[in-house]
Image: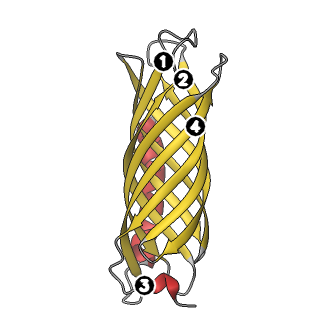
Amino acid sequence: MRSIALAGLLPAFALAAILTSTTKAHAEPILGVDLDLGTAFRRQVDLSLGAGGRFGYRFHFPVTSFYLQPELGGHYTSFGSGNDLAYFDHAGTAFGGIRLGFGHIVQPNFFAHLGLGFVGNNQLGPAADIGGGLDFQITRLFSLGVQAAYNTVTIPDSYYAAKWVSFGMNLGFHFDTGGGRRWRR
């Protein structure tokens, strides 16, 4: 099933390569840092804390304000102590995925990631998240935003899947190699 989902992303990567292959295209590396709060499903958790990082390469579509950003990253979430979830007190993921957004100063975006996750100390399985965000381009090289996501890690050979919602802020560090294209109007 995971290979089918990964194969579904191939047309998006091919489209990005075709649309950004002109000489007018602009691309830039991006380093993102996520700081999250959240809550798990299935049982009551008062507060979870999470942090993660992403590295991507943003391709700006010519003549539009749209961008496509393939990215790799990881995320860790602690569901706190005293939550009666002994086997599910923390979770983490290593992922690859894609982000699609638009705009210049205000940048709404949507993202989806697939990868490998863990729950507790020794339970590995496929992981996925899907969500959206709103970034504000503070300077040419820095953005600040908010995001929310639905996360899941499925444990094979069991009927168990860890599911949680995360929301928080993200910091974006843009290594602009094209002379600040996003500031032109």
Residue at the spot x=52%, y=21% of the render? 80
Residue 61 image offset from top left, x and y in percent: 50, 78
Q: How many marks?
A: 4
Percent position (x, y) of residue 114? 45, 42
Kind of residue indicated by mark 3: Gly
Give whichever of 107, 64 is nearer the camera: 107
Distance from Cα at disc 3 to Cα at disc 2? 41 Å
Which of the two labelled residues, at mark 1 and mark 3, occupies the earlier sequence position? 1
Q: Is 141 positioned to the left or the right of 145 in the image?
A: left
Q: Secondary structure at mark 3?
A: loop
73 lies left or right of 78: left
Seen in the picture, residue 177 relative to 79 is either above or below; the reply is: below
Q: Earlier in the sequence, mark 2 or mark 1?
A: 1
Q: Which residue lies under the disc numbered 1?
A: 89
The residue wearing badge 2 is: 162
Q: Are marks 1 and 3 in contact (CB under 8 Å)?
A: no
Label 1 to label 4: alpha-carbon separation: 14 Å
Confirm whether residue 62 shows in the render. no
The residue at 36%/89% (across/down) is: 23
Spatial distance from mark 1 to mark 3, Cα to Cα? 43 Å
Give the mark nearer the N terminus: 1 vs 4: 4
Is 159 or 142 nearer to us in this picture?
142
* Residue 116 screen position, x and y as percent: 38, 33
Whether residues under marks 2 and 4 lie with C-beta atoms below 8 angstroms apart, the answer is no
Dot in front, 2 or 1 = 1
Q: Nearer the viewer, mark 2 or mark 4?
A: 4
Q: CA distance from mark 2 to mark 1?
A: 10 Å
Residue kind at label 1, given as amino acid type: Asp
Q: Nearer the viewer, mark 3 or mark 2?
A: 3
